[in-house]
Image (spheres, helix red, strand yellow):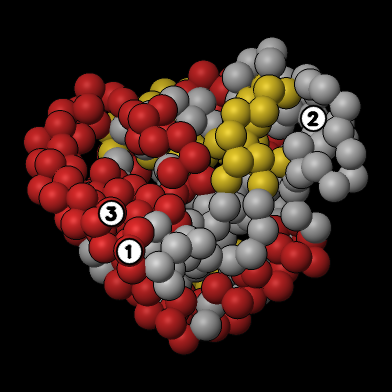
Amino acid sequence: MPPTTALDPRSTAALACAVCGNHDARVRYPVRDLIQARDGQWWFVTCQACGHGYLSPHPSEQELGELYRSLWSPEGLQLASNVGRSGFESKLTKARLAGLRAVLGSHPVQRLLDVGCGLGFFLRALHEAWPQAEALGVELVDQAASRAERPGIDVLRLPWEQVQLPAEDFDIVTLIHFLEHQTDPGVDIDKAAALLRPGGALVVEVPRLDGWGRRLFGRWYWPHLPPQHLQVFSRAGLVRLLEERGLDVGFVRARSGYPLQACTTLVLFARYTFGSQSPYKSNWLVRAPLMALGFSLLPSFFLFDLLVAPLLNLLGMGDILLVVGRKKA
């Protein structure tokens, strides 16, 4: 990578690849917050050694703290609640439970832990699947944690890095859409694995680097979601992280994708190139014909979402990666 200046957001010299530790990265394309239109521009880069993807530069801990607190506004809580009750989330939950059962086998489940449990939808699903188990969540934001708690379900209101629990005391630990937010996900996997009893299972789910959506749409792939998402894992990279930490990976699934991915991408592209977030937002001589073109393309993109995307997902090219590893005896 060429030398960069302090004003150049491509400065990655201080960043080591979260999978292999290599410092040599390739700048792929600029990314921005397409969903909430927050100010800022970052770069998506990939490790030259192993191909792992990550955001450059990483935001500060203070910036991230302010961001996460703002996400749990009343509107954010309602959105998360709607997603948690959706058919999309229900399908993901079924896949996670199927992976757990396949990996655990006859191993008894006495305690389970969901890290970053949010509003607790998956934590409750775990508790329903193993009602005899003690269920515990970790969620820093009180507004979310208070909704996650139920009879038989407790939630620790602490940052994950401050959580101290007995080693080898859990049979299930889950990191659902958690590792992509972490600066050093290997450390988090180490900590989670240390909490597992031999034979226990770790569940990890993340957006996927080598899925069809990221490959096809590049900078317009909205799950880049900067500055929240710091890491984008490939199948090989995530499996490597688990196996290097003594976990036998017994279940890998990449058959899930985000709903209406192509249509969403078209809408976001229009918004930022000639729509309400573009330099042409007040120039209807430019906007009108381009909006007409965008509307004419929408049926084709919808057909892609309806017919092609499900096939790509079934072929294992989906954009959501689920991996379940078992702690060795």
Residues tagged 3 and 2 counted as in contact (Cβ below 8 A): no
Question: Which comes sooner in the sequence, label 3 or label 2?
Answer: 2
Which numbered disc covers residue 290?
3
Residue 138 drawn at (x, y percent): 60, 64
Instruction: Farthest residue to the bottom: give it.
Output: 74
Q: Is residue 12 above or below residue 305?
A: above
Residue type at numbered disc 1: Leu
Q: Nearer the viewer, residue 256 or 292?
A: 292
Q: Is residue 31 left or right of residue 93?
A: right
Q: Is label 2 in a helix, a strand or a loop?
A: loop
> Which residue bears the numbered disc 2?
16
Q: Is residue 138 left or right of residue 257?
A: right
Residue type at numbered disc 3: Leu
> Which residue bears the numbered disc 1?
285
* Point 9% across, 36% down: residue: 307
Q: Quadrant of the N terminus?
A: top right
Which numbered disc covers residue 23?
none
